[in-house]
Image (cartoon, rainbow, N blue to C red):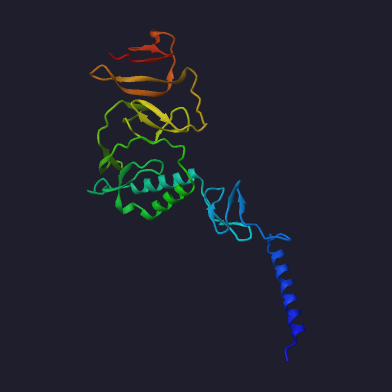
Amino acid sequence: MLNLSRMASSRQLGAGVLVVLLAACGGSSKRGGPGPTHCEYGGKSYEPGASFPDLDACNTCSCGDDGDVSCTLRGCSSCSDIVAGYDALMQGAKRCDPTEPNQCGQRVVEGLRCNCDTFVNASGWDAAGAESLATQYREAACGQDVVCGACNPAVTGRCSAAGSCVSDHEPADGVACLVNGTLYPNGATNVPDPNSCNTCVCDQGRLGCTEIGCSIPCADGTAPGTRCALCGPADGCEVVETGCLPTCIDDSACAGGSCIDGVCALICG
């Protein structure tokens, strides 16, 4: 004959153990009603079973049936670390031997910020490493403040006498930009802002830049400005210089030029 009183006691014991386990695991069932039906995280509400980005824009979180949020704990690099890693990878891939032919024939994406292309040495290109860094860059939501213009397509690659792959680009129409002595064609991207840590696009001689607050003050006797640096045969300005330019009061201080907006510049035409 079955002992019904012993069975009832076992059921009561099991229920008591279940309550203890729920309390120990942080269960959030409410007395007299059902448990929570959603998770609150970062000011947003998520349904049980939903996955969503962690607040660090790197890890992934999920909403449990009990309303608790659990997240992965992988180490995440900053955007600057990711960009620096890709730049180092690119630098290694451009190494070549100028005494050997046809080394710079693989076309790849030059940087993570903008999708312009360049040529590298295929034997030194780490495709898996590049894809991993590109994935980290996307998952960390980097580049949201980067301004990208039209790319000047790379046509061929060659090994320079210094042992580095360089790319020859299609000639770009329009006014070029002169920054810190370097000439950038119209449409060039990742141009350094001479007056801050921002990056820019050369747009018809003018720089369109990101807006990170990291200004670099000019030296005494200079001021931020722009000026024409080269007049073309049709009397139009072909190169516009941007940066810390020597200040002036009148034309007497500008050999071969004119004092315009407080800096010496050329007048074309």
Judged left or right of residue 57, residue 204 is left
Residue 105 percent coordinates (x, y): 26, 48
In the picture, the quarter occupied by the N terminus is bottom right
Residue 210 percent coordinates (x, y): 45, 33
In the displayed structure, would residue 249 be above or below residue 44? above
In the picture, the quarter occupied by the C terminus is top left
Residue 223 percent coordinates (x, y): 46, 19
Identify the image quadrant of residue 123. Answer: bottom left
User: Which residue is more in the foreground, 237 or 246?
Assistant: 237
In the displayed structure, would residue 196 be above or below residue 10? above
For the view shown, which residue lies furthest in the bottom direction?
A: 1
Which residue is depicted at the point 61% across and 50% down? Answer: 41
Identify the image quadrant of residue 194. Answer: top left
Residue 158 percent coordinates (x, y): 25, 43
Which residue is depicted at the point 23% across and 48% down? Answer: 102
User: Residue 164, can we see it?
Assistant: no
User: Residue 38, can we see it?
Assistant: yes
Which residue is depicted at the point 65% across and 57% down? Answer: 36
Judged left or right of residue 207, residue 164 is left
Judged left or right of residue 141, residue 239 is left
Identify the image quadrant of residue 249. Answer: top left
